[in-house]
Image: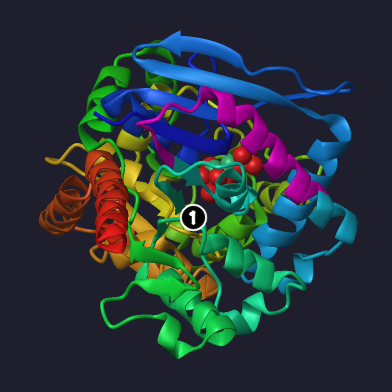
Amino acid sequence: MARLVCVSNRISLPRKSAAPGGLAVGILSALKRTGGLWFGWGGETIEHDPGDPDIHIREGVTYATIELKQNEYELYYNGYSNDLLWPLFHYFLRGMRYSNEERDAYESVNRLFAQKLLPLLQPQDLVWVHDYHLIPLGRLLREMGVQRPIGFFLHIPFPNIEMLRVLPSYAELLNDLTHYDVVGFQTENDLKGFHSGIEYLFGAEAIRPDGRIRVGDRLLRAEVFPIGVDVDGVQAEAVAATDTDVVRRMIDSLMSRSLMIGVDRLDYSKGLVERFSAYQHFLETYPDNIGRITYIQIAPLSRTDVRAYADIRKSLEQAAGRTNWRFADTDWTPIRYLNRNFPHGTLSGFLRAANVGVVTPLRDGMNLVAKEFVAAQDPENPGVLILSNLAGAARELVSALLVNPYDTRAVSHAMQTALSMPLPERRERHAAMLDVIKRNDISTWTRRFVEALEQSQREEARVRVVGKK
Ligand code: F6P
């Protein structure tokens, strides 16, 4: 059987706790099922040239990590990846900044990834590259002679060509994607964005009637593979965490008040400032809730060396401060805003304890916290999910209370609706969402993508045989 090799910028080492939701949790659950190799940046920077990858083997998964030089980290990770591609792909043009030096570093770090990965590859491997940091990697591996199937999955949104064209190197980026055998997106909308780019650059005839894309001698499949969560795992973790000291203490501290919870990386795309304003509006508009609800926002710091992230941090501290200043009492704090992370199991326990989960990004590829919230609930007495209709997850979780995250009044109204929702309606909505996330859980996502890669390999072999005749 082929070995699965996942490659991503960030990897989640077994001894460290993974950030909430996100790529690392997804890849880890996938690899724990299939076994295989996970190759990526270990999160450390150095001053000298990086050496051979560090290898750790744990529970059937081999972790291979490399280090990056400090200036490469600056230009490739903080710069090109997170100060250019991230805002652009999330439709935040104002936050975007382009630099040729960063573009060169993006290429050279991708080359470094390819060079360090190459000696670890085996003849039967299926290579699966993840996310926007590593778009050129497939082309570079091909240039180095790798013939095995290589797939790419984008965890974040893919913009329409009219947005993408703002990027001076948009043609290279699109062309690089055509070097993969399978390119996967979170939603139909992202796939449409990709098709719009392919059509713009290579003409409408590049997209064949069967949906595959032909560019020169390359033939690829571009499809939608919405990422899921490990539903049974999250459920079990959430139940187990209920009896832990940390979750008990949190519940006791509520003193029977309702709990609304948000768990997001501290990122401007997550809509936290807008969410805090909506909560303040909610307390003003529905004053019966004053003193009766606690909103806990967990927001671990993220990408702290990028200016936009420092700015959003300041705005949030002010926004939380304003609401607490206005409404807090000697025995009640309306918002508990925590910039720290918790182990995944503890977070699942917190999610289970919540009456309302609030997930209101301004734009999001999928948002796995929304799915984890559903998985963590007690089906007999579930909490209510308020979900942004600009998150990929809204395509599947249609039984959530869907809101436009910019609409303060609508979000605050949804908070009131969620808190007063009768049990039968809560159960019905939750059951519908649980069914959806069970049908498309993390193993379905992995299996579908790997099958697509294997199929591309069979097609490739057929083409070779026919070519020989
Ligand atoms: O897809 C975006 C994403 O990779 C998430 O999946 C993940 O949670 C987050 O970004 C991690 O960001 P970083 O690696 O920059 O900390």
Q: Residue furthest front?
A: 469
Query: Do we see residue 92 in this rendering?
Result: no
Q: Decide: is 390 above or below 436.
A: below
Asked where in the image residue 54 lies, by quadrant, the reply is top right
Report helix, strand or loop for mark 1: loop
Question: Where on the image, by quarter, is ligand 1?
Answer: top right
Q: Quadrant of the C terminus?
A: bottom left
Q: Quadrant of the N terminus?
A: top left
Q: Amino acid at mark 1?
A: Leu
Q: Nearer the viewer, residue 419 or 166?
A: 166
User: In this view of the protein, can residue 31 be seen by the observer?
Assistant: yes
Q: Name the residue at 49% across, 44% down.
A: 129
In which quadrant of the rendered view does residue 329 lie? top right
193 over 424 or under it: above or below: below
Q: Looking at the image, which is closer to me, 163 or 285?
A: 163
What segment is highlighted magenta in the picture?
105-127
Q: Is residue 114 left or right of residue 253?
A: right
Seen as rendered, the residue at the extreme bottom is: 204
Residue 96 placement (x, y as % from top left): 77, 66
- In the picture of the structure, the residue carrying the numbered disc 1 is 154
**Occupied quadrant, residue 254:** top left
Vertical comparison of 70 with 291: above or below: above
Q: Nearer the viewer, residue 289 or 206?
A: 206
Q: Is 396 covered by the magenta stretch?
A: no
Q: Residue at the spot x=57%, y=24% of the render?
A: 119
Residue 243 at x, y = what percent? 29, 15
